[in-house]
Image (cartoon, rainbow, N blue to C red):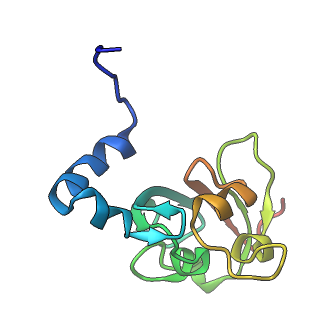
Amino acid sequence: MDCPTVVNNVETLAAIGPIISMGGDVYARTGYGKSTGTKLMSACGNINKPGVYEIEMGLPVEDFIYSEEYCGGIKNGRMLKAVIPGGSSVPILPADLTLNTAKGESRLLTYESLAEGEFESGSMLGFRRIHCL
């Protein structure tokens, strides 16, 4: 092998500094279960604070959407209607399946829960209840 490796994923590059400064063992304790470290989540649509956020894995989706630290809730105090959890090839998730799993448990931002909810890309487009979908 003895060849250089190309890393062109911004999340991987962003994690290098904390891994080196904290040490791999400490960084691996950040997060939840098998989903260690942090993830960049992009949020847009009818939310108060669209942007790209670095979140610690394990954060509940509800906290991500409604917390002032992140998205700040839905515009004009409306209720969440649905989310497109990625690009145009993923299904639209109704609010109840965005915030909770099919088992009724709080959906966490973990790789396992993200894959189940089609959030693998780390992005979401939120819609408030007044929109026709």
Q: Nearer the viewer, residue 33 or 97?
A: 33
How far from the left and from the top, in percent, is residue 87?
Answer: 66, 43
Left or right for 70, reference 6: right
How far from the left and from the top, in percent, is residue 13?
Answer: 30, 41
Q: Nearer the viewer, residue 7 or 76?
A: 7
Residue 88 in which image quadrant: top right
Q: Nearer the viewer, residue 50 or 121?
A: 121
Residue furthest to the bottom: 77
Left or right for 129, reference 69: right
**124 versus 101 height, above or below:** above
How far from the left and from the top, in percent, is residue 90?
Answer: 76, 46
- Give the tally of numbered discs: 0
**123 versus 79 height, above or below:** above
**40 versus 79 height, above or below:** above
Q: Residue, x 37% and y 69% (percent of image)?
A: 30
How far from the left and from the top, in percent, is residue 56?
Answer: 42, 69
Q: Residue, x 79% and y 56% (percent of image)?
A: 92
Left or right for 96, reference 45: right
Query: Could you tell me which quadrant the C terminus lies in?
Result: bottom right
Query: Could you tell me which quadrant the N terminus lies in?
Result: top left
Residue furthest to the left: 21
Q: Residue, x 19% and y 52% (percent of image)?
A: 20
Q: Residue, x 83% and y 78% (percent of image)?
A: 103
Residue 40 in which image quadrant: bottom left
